[in-house]
Image: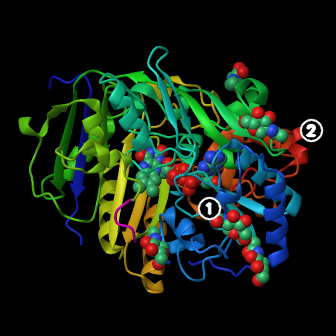
């Protein structure tokens, strides 16, 4: 193996083969009218806002709404719709939206890439408007300083593409799916296959432009280190709107190696996973080996062979990880329409701190086969390396040293029936319950970017969800929240709540 970087996917091919929320909103036309009037009166002549306002009376309202809905679970006729959508064309429109929504007492939902697994960026059970960031997508790279400014509404595919246009030996550590928005993805941590070498996206963010609850445009210096700490891993939507991030690029070799080694249970997948657990978080940090147990048998191939190792420039590895063939033109990175356009999902996460014994693995495989999900997929992502060296309070993201790997659970389906939704969601919950003896506890840690409403909401002062997501960083997040957003303007089901008592201690 010549590549300095090697990524290996082991697919454990196991020969295998629910909750709806909806409520109706009625808000008077006069609320919308006064909101729209306010927007117009706060609009600067040199930045007209009219072209950015969509109310249900505009003929493209629904198309704008659908454009960034990524999960069909939140795309039904009973899914609550916004009173209006503001497709901000510049930062002044974001400022006006915050000021006017606050004045009109309307909740906002901020949407960048729209990938929130529970639709929290575009659905609410109370009257709301969507602040849609997709027009704010510029990416400005400065090779001299190896830094870039990237707008919240840019996708990571666009970032990867623009970096590759400038350099073959630079990259940025972020996620696999090209259509993720920088606004949500980075503020939730942002991880990808360079995690062990370089840590998370937030570990390479050096400045940001945000709009706070008073509609002020701030940068790192003017927002202060507390807020800058919180938006790196604490989820920005509890505190402010991200207009843009300043990032530091990382260096990669000219050639990178990728592998894919499928194994079925009959081919000894369990032994491979046992070995993987012993080495994956301790081997050379340039090696990131993801295990992907799944219930669909697609690749009838055997063990690792020389031809499984393919060398390529870093940018090509993004295609490999995204499942695209190597001949695919790089412009696929710029495509904002995910495929399939119609699909349902339920996701969960866990952190594993000690190896799961053979008997445990066997119990889990059995459960995966038994449970009637349409497609079950898991992704086991090794930790260690850089992740163990960054302190758990350096940013708001707490899951650092002490983890062997992080797991994602995904059930995917395309059947529109309520029965399918119920069955697949239940199956995901049951599989998650099966893992209880083998994963972190007190708190049962979870990954913010893998949004999961089952871990709780902030209703009635409940903080269980926050402790799972942020561990000991909850206290500082509560303090930052009380300081920067004392009226709790930036709120949603899992936002950091306002707790005056937490401030006083
Ligand atoms: C196919 C797929 C693959 C994925 N792969 C990875 C992966 O490899 N690594 C990883 O870390 N995660 C991954 N994720 C999870 C992903 O990081 C999260 O869903 C992330 O929140 C998406 O950000 P977004 O801007 O696209 O989503 P949105 O739905 O737009 O936003 C998500 C959250 O961030 C808030 N938000 C969005 N924009 C802003 C803003 N400008 N200012 C303030 N708050 C904002 C929203 O209000 C919401 O709370 C994946 C998700 C999908 C669907
Ligand atoms: C409110 O209703 C009136 C009359 O039906 C309509 O003309 C107007 O466009 C509506 N306002 C908005 C913002 O939809
Ligand atoms: C309007 O925008 C212009 C250009 O950005 C700026 O110079 C001016 O100060 C703004 N005016 C107000 C009233 O904010
Ligand atoms: C949508 O309608 C509102 C009035 O209801 C108007 O102010 C706005 O300019 C329209 N938006 C677009 C993009 O045409
Ligand atoms: C949402 O519904 C619209 C209209 O039916 C459709 O065009 C779009 O593809 C759907 N999106 C998803 C993710 O289901
Ligand atoms: C993190 O915690 C350590 C030890 O408790 C403390 O000394 C340090 O100041 C903290 N760092 C931050 C950034 O809060």
Side of 5 where 414 appears, left or right: right
Q: Closest to the observer: 410 or 78?
A: 78
The answer to which image quadrant residue 397 occupies is top right
Magenta stretch in the rendered image: 338-342
Q: Residues within 10 Å of mark 2 (few under 14, many from 20)?
A: few
> Can you give x and y, in whole percent of width and height, for residue 335 in the image?
37, 52
Q: Which mark is residue 120?
A: 1
Q: Is mark 2 within 8 Å of ligand 6?
A: no
Task: Locate ligand 4 by image quadrant.
Answer: bottom right
Q: Quadrant of the N terminus?
A: top left
Residue positioned 59% across, 64% down in the render: 454
> Can you give x and y, in whole percent of width and height, for residue 449 in the image?
53, 49
Image height of 250 relative to 56, above or below: above
The residue that mark 2 highlights is 504
Residue positioned 88% across, 51% down in the render: 487
User: Does the magenta stretch mainly form a helix, a strand or a loop?
Assistant: loop
């Amino acid at each position: 193996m010549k590549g300095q970087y090697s990524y290996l996917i082991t697919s454990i091919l196991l020969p295998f083969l629910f909750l709806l929320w909806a409520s109706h909103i009625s808000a008077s036309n006069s609320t919308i009218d006064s909101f729209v009037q306010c927007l117009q009166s706060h609009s600067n002549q040199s930045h007209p806002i009219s072209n950015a306002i969509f109310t249900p009376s505009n003929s493209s309202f629904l198309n704008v709404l659908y454009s960034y809905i990524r999960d069909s679970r939140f795309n039904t006729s009973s899914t609550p719709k916004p009173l209006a959508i503001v497709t901000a064309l510049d930062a002044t429109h974001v400022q006006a939206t915050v000021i006017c929504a606050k004045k009109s007492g309307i909740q906002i939902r901020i949407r960048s890439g729209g990938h929130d697994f529970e639709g929290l960026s575009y659905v609410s059970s109370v009257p709301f408007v969507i602040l849609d960031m997709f027009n704010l997508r510029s990416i400005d790279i400065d090779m001299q300083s190896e830094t870039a400014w990237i707008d919240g509404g840019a996708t990571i595919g666009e970032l990867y593409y623009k970096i590759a246009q400038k350099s073959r030996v630079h990259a940025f550590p972020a996620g696999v799916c090209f259509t993720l928005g920088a606004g949500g993805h980075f503020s939730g941590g942002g991880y990808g296959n360079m995690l062990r070498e370089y840590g998370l996206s937030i570990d390479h963010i050096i400045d940001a432009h945000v709009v706070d609850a008073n509609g002020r445009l701030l940068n790192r210096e003017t927002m202060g280190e507390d807020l800058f700490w919180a938006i790196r891993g604490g989820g920005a939507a509890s505190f402010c709107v991200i207009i843009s991030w300043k990032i530091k690029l990382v260096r990669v070799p000219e050639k990178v190696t990728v592998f894919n080694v499928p194994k079925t249970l009959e081919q000894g997948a369990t032994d491979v996973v046992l070995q993987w657990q012993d080495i994956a978080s301790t081997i050379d940090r340039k090696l990131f080996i993801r295990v992907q147990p799944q219930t669909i048998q697609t690749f009838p191939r055997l063990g690792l062979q020389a031809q499984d190792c393919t060398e390529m420039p870093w940018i090509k590895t993004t295609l490999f990880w995204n499942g695209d063939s190597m001949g695919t033109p790089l412009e696929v990175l710029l495509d904002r329409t995910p495929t399939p356009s119609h699909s349902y999902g339920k996701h969960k996460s866990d952190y594993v701190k000690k190896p799961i014994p053979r008997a445990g693995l066997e119990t889990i495989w059995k459960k995966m086969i038994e449970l009637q999900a349409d497609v079950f997929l898991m992704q086991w992502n090794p930790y260690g390396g850089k992740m163990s060296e960054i302190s758990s309070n350096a940013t708001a993201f707490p899951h650092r040293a002490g983890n062997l790997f992080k797991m994602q659970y995904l059930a995917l389906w395309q059947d529109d029936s309520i029965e399918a939704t119920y069955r697949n969601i239940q199956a995901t919950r049951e599989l998650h319950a099966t893992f209880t003896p083998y994963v972190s506890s007190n708190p049962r840690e979870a990954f913010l970017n893998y949004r999961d409403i089952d871990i709780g909401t902030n209703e009635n002062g409940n903080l269980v969800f926050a402790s799972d997501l942020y561990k000991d960083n909850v206290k500082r997040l509560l303090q930052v929240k009380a300081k920067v957003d004392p009226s709790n303007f930036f709120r949603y089901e899992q936002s950091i709540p306002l707790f005056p008592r937490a401030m006083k201690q």
